[in-house]
Image (tube, rainbow, N blue to C red):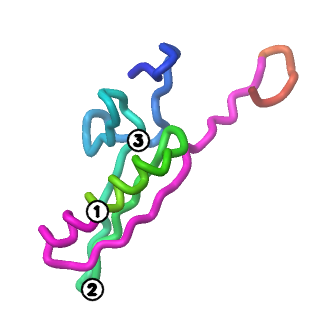
Amino acid sequence: MLAVAGAADALTGAPRYSNLLTRDGQVIGFWRTVLDHEQALVEVHLARPLDAATQSALEDEVERYGRFLQLPARLLTKPRARRGRSDTRGRGPL
């Protein structure tokens, strides 16, 4: 996967090619659903922050997904987990 600027930007912990979240042809995250008998929790892991329009569109889609499941749906967004790679020269995390 490539980020908008062309640098590699693979999401850590993301299952490959499953439940991808895209915007304008770019992968911006992935999602999973945690179901119980009362609600559907839609957990979204983001590669970068969302603008207001994208956040609103995501909230609308989660609401539609809840109607499809016939359960109330709640959105939980999580920012991208930073990888703690260390520089080989000992300067600490990048």
Q: Is 73 inside the magenta-drawn segment?
A: yes
Q: Residue at x 29, y 61 (%)?
A: 60
Residue most extreme to the bottom: 38
Please name the amino acid that badge 1 sits on. Answer: Val
Q: Quadrant of the C terminus?
A: top right
Residue that badge 2 annotates: 38
Task: State the extent of the magenta-drawn residues as a range.
Answer: 63-87
Please name the amino acid that badge 2 sits on. Answer: Glu
Q: Secondary structure at mark 2?
A: loop
Q: Position of residue 49 (x, y in %)?
A: 54, 44
Residue depth check, mark 2 versus mark 1: number of the one nearer the observer: 1
Q: Position of residue 61 (x, y in %)?
A: 26, 58
Label 2 vs 3, first from the N-terminus: 3
Q: Disc 2 to disc 3, how far (Cα)?
A: 26 Å
Of the pair 14 and 40, the residue shown nearer to us: 40
Q: Quadrant of residue 29?
A: top left
Residue that badge 1 annotates: 62
Q: Residue at x 87, y 23 (%)?
A: 91
Q: Quadrant of residue 39?
A: bottom left
